Image (spheres, rainbow, N blue to C red):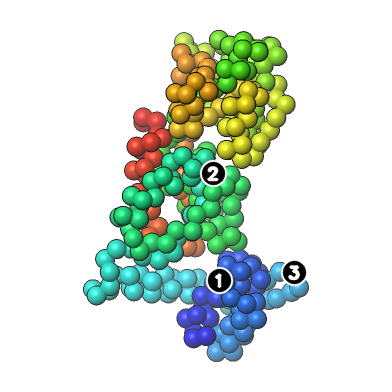
Amino acid sequence: MDRFDCMRVFVRVVEAGSFTKAAETLDISRATVTQSIQQLEAHLRIKLLNRTTRKVNVTKDGAAYFERVVKLLNELEDIEHNLPGSPGSPRGLLRVDVPSPFANIILVPALPDFYARFPDIQLELGASDRKVDLIGDNVDCVVRGGEITDGALIARHVGNLRLGVYAAPSYLKQLGTPLHPQELIESDHRIIRYRWANELPYGLRKDGVDARLQGRSMLEIDDGNAYLTAGLAGLGVQWLPEYMAKRHIKNGELVRLFSDWQFDSMPLYVAYSPNRYASKQLRVFIEWITHLIAQHASAPQ
């Protein structure tokens, strides 16, 4: 490996905190990772990492070197992508993770337009509702609904999702249609809970009265697609972004409740690590997805 390759391996080891995880995300052998770090330390004549059987810690010299190397590699990438003779279109690999319903309903169907504009960007798309470790999982950015509480990330607000409360006709036939949110607490109605949002900060109001979606729960789900399916199956009342419910409202598979109430919206963010360079492909992706959300999902400001 040349010195720049060794630098890239070193950066990935520090970010991942593991030789094995760095090898997996770089698609090289662990032995190659070890050899690269050894070559770099020998060249610099300093110890960059303290290695134990369980963990890799960066030394004081290694931390200072890491900070400078990240800037150097980012500048090198920017230079290569902006040479007069290089293609004008952004290019390279971009690793993105988005909520699974958002991927299925909005993002993936719009990808032909993305590739028509940016044919040289290779997307590696994760569609999940799990909490992603951007550094450990080697992800460039995530799209997430709700406030970003991790202060170590840069979060760009890209839109607001319109929300509503819904239930299937079969459920309403069995338990009746509630006309006030308080009825969900004082009756046999059931709430389907989404695991990552048990304490919903999004309220609804009418005539100066504030309310929240509360009630008895017999089901909690951690995947957005399964959560929607549970509502369609008549298992309870649920919050949903309007983009998830729209088709099912039209088909008569869901009924919107409390339509005379005003609902808070859910902020949507693109988040990425400040240690990662905001590459040209990341910047154009953020601009593109902001426009996409404004078209298909965003509530008016």
Whole-Å distance between the Cαs marked 1 and 3? 20 Å
Q: Is residue 92 left or right of residue 175?
A: left
User: Which three-letter amino acid code belongs to the residue tagged 2?
Assistant: Ser
Find residue 288 and report its horizontal and vertical position in percent: 35, 49
Q: Is residue 278 left or right of residue 32?
A: left
Eyeballing the image, is 246 above or below 138?
above
Task: Tell me, yes or no, if residue 52 can be seen here.
Answer: yes
Mark 2 crowdedness (10 Å alpha carbons): few <14, some 14-19, many ≥20 = some
Q: Which residue is mark 2?
A: 100
User: Which three-letter amino acid code belongs to the residue tagged 1?
Assistant: Leu
| Residue positioned most to the front | 251
Depth check: give the residue in front, 46 or 13.
Answer: 13
Q: Which mark is residue 26?
A: 1
Depth check: give the residue in front, 42 or 243.
Answer: 243
Say which element carries label 1.
Answer: helix
Depth check: give the residue in front, 267 or 191.
Answer: 191
User: Which three-letter amino acid code belongs to the residue tagged 3?
Assistant: Arg
Q: Which mark is residue 54?
A: 3
Say which element carries label 3.
Answer: loop
Find residue 76 and report its horizontal and vertical position in percent: 38, 74
Q: Are circles 2 and 3 on residues that touch, CB within 8 Å?
A: no
Tell me which corner region of the image, top left, top right, bottom left or bottom right, holds residue 51: bottom right
Whole-Å distance between the Cαs marked 2 and 1? 25 Å
**Residue at left offset 53%, top offset 23%:** 253
Tell me which corner region of the image, top left, top right, bottom left or bottom right, holds residue 233: top right
- Badge 2 or badge 1: first in the primary sequence: 1
Eyeballing the image, is 6 above or below 234?
below
Task: Tell me, yes or no, if residue 14 can be seen here.
Answer: no
